[in-house]
Image (cartoon, coloured by chain):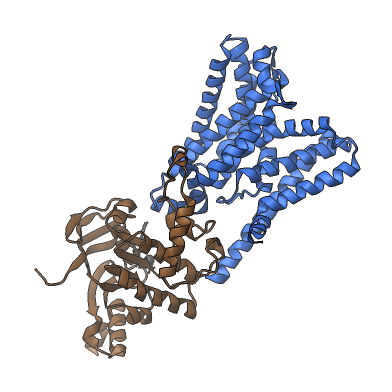
Amino acid sequence: MSNDNYIIRAKNITKYFGSIAALENVDFELKDGEILGLVGDNGAGKSTLIKILSGAELPNDGSIEVFGKPVSIKNPKDAFELGIETIYQDLALFENLDFSQNIFAGREYKSEGIGWLFGFVDSRKMQKEASQTIKNISINLPLLTQKVKQLSGGQRQAITITRALFWGQKIIIMDEPAAALGVRESKKVLDLIKETRKHVNGIIIITHNIEHIIKIADRVIVLRNGRRVGDIIFKDYGDRLDDLHNDIVKLITGAEIMNYHS
Amino acid sequence: MRFLKRITGQREFSIFVIVAAIFIIMSFTSPYFLTKTNIHTLLLALSITAILAVGMTNLLISGGIDLSVGSVVGFTGIVAALLIKKAGMPLVLAIIITLVLGALIGLFNGFMVAKVGINPFIVTLAGLSLFRGLTYIVNSGQQVAQLGDAFNSIGQAVFLDVQLPIYYALLLVIIGDVLLRKNRFLRQNYFIGGNEKASRLLGIHVDKVKIINYMLMSAIAAFAGIVMTARMGAAMVYAGTGLELRVITAVIIGGASLSGGEGSAIGAFLGSLIMVLTINILSLLNVSIYWQTFVIGGVLLLAVTLDTLNIKRREKTIIKKT
Ligand SMILES: Nc1ncnc2c1ncn2[C@@H]1O[C@H](COP(=O)(O)OP(=O)(O)OP(=O)(O)O)[C@@H](O)[C@H]1O
Ligand SMILES: [Mg+2]
């Protein structure tokens, strides 16, 4: 077929909530090495689509291939095992716990020796590995033993990304990674995402911030009212960033039709 | 220095300081306070509260609560007595059946909370009345006494000058503390109480863990029921009345939070110690029993208020930071 190396390829994804069609026959593909933006107005179906890819929702129709193999993603564990890690809008962190406890939540190392008999976990080993991981990634956490509730929004986002990288995930999906952050913090997160690209096969980012997406992505897919209305490859625009910006906005709002008439 | 800082920063440490202060002040105020008899009375009173507090902490960490424990203590206590006295069962069998009954009560509570989805306050408030009612019904409101020396020794036997229930409590607190910190299954409670939705996304079997928490709680309450009956040498129909408030207060003083995700067994033990000390002081100062009930209510309200203010402050800082 095509020369492109698809790591995710979904076809005809359809999802109804009651009588509302959140997604109708949506095709979606993520290429190897790509940072892909997924954009669209409120209610366009972005979150629903990535929930289907991460096993949090089941589609009514459609097929999905991951790394070239047809798969059925029925729950978050299936997605995890395929190498897909999703960072949801509300981050899904445990604020009452610290960095290493968050990295290992639900996937703890078991103790060896007698501790094993009592179902003990190996906290020391987990702390050690967590602190090593954090050295490889440029985020600064003042204290590894600090609870997440004491950390800033950017630091929290960094933990979720670190968690994905730690578990060797190949595809990272982020729903609004910089939505609640100030200018400085969002810049840090964007830098971190760029750096993350070196360690993974592909990244999908949902955002309403077109400037952010132009800064870091290679391509966007645009949804409108549950349908895919187009995709734009950034390198086709060279450094005509204003045109790129306008064209994305036009696709999102459907304004290109009005332009056509004027 | 670092070690000192870590220790002093902990909630448990502040409680420990309070307890020490109470001891010092009381030893000057009442000459009777530091006598061996009073300390022993104090520890004995502590034992039942502390035993229950371990199960209650575990529940609160996961975001649950159990208001029925006092009634379950009363109900299982009288059932154990009837099994021995009326049914003539061997001791070990009667104990096992009582503990299983406790676990089944917990299964019921847990099922209503996790599977039917009713608020745990409501489920266990109903349980408070249900099981107290059953306590009266099973023996037509009569107490059951003369249970035999073998049974009574469970609560009355002395080892190295110390009565057995105190050992049970210490043992349970130590085991509970280690397991809550290290056991993979019980640690899941911190995840569930911290962020239930995220726990589900990680594949933690939230409903199953919740049900098991309630089963542990009620089985521990059944154990407390047996110990209490044995200590009194009789199963009274009002045994355990009001205990739930004392236990919940103790656990919240000890660092557990009504919003879940926080708490430790050591904290629960120290919280129980503060509760029992408060009551002990009131009796030593000849404050009437009516006022004692009033004071427990006041302490609970104070503890919960501080907890709530703490939660609010936390939420504020989060909003500021994100
Ligand atoms: N659990 C649900 N039950 C019912 N309707 C839902 C549910 N989840 C989403 N929808 C509907 O599906 C449509 C798509 O929602 P979705 O959350 O995917 O949009 P979105 O593109 O992520 O929007 P936003 O940018 O506001 O996050 C909307 O009309 C929404 O109301
Ligand atoms: Mg969304």
Rendered location of residue B23, percent (x, y)? 81, 44
Name the quadrant containing residue B56. Answer: top right
What residue is rendered at 60% in x and 23% in y? B76
What residue is rendered at 67% in x and 39% in y? B247
Chain colored blue: B
Is A139 above or below relative to A96? below
Is B305 above or below relative to B124? below
**Res. B187 visible in picture:** yes
Chain A: its colour in the image is: brown
What residue is rendered at 69% in x and 32% in y? B47
User: Does residue B65 appear to the left or right of B167 in the view shown?
Assistant: left
Write down which quadrant ligand 2 falls in. bottom left
Name the quadrant containing residue A25. Answer: bottom left
Q: How many numbered discs sit on the rendered protein?
A: 0
Rendered location of residue B65, percent (x, y)? 58, 42
Nearer to the camera, B67 or A185:
A185
**Res. A92 visible in picture:** no
User: Does residue A177 appear to the left or right of B217 in the view shown?
Assistant: left
Rendered location of residue B295, percent (x, y)? 79, 42
Is B65 above or below relative to A194? above
User: Does residue B272 appear to the left or right of A208 in the view shown?
Assistant: right
Nearer to the camera, A44 or A127:
A127
What residue is rendered at 66% in x and 36% in y? B50
Assign the N terminus of chain B to one quadrant of the image. Answer: bottom right
Rendered location of residue B300, percent (x, y)? 71, 45
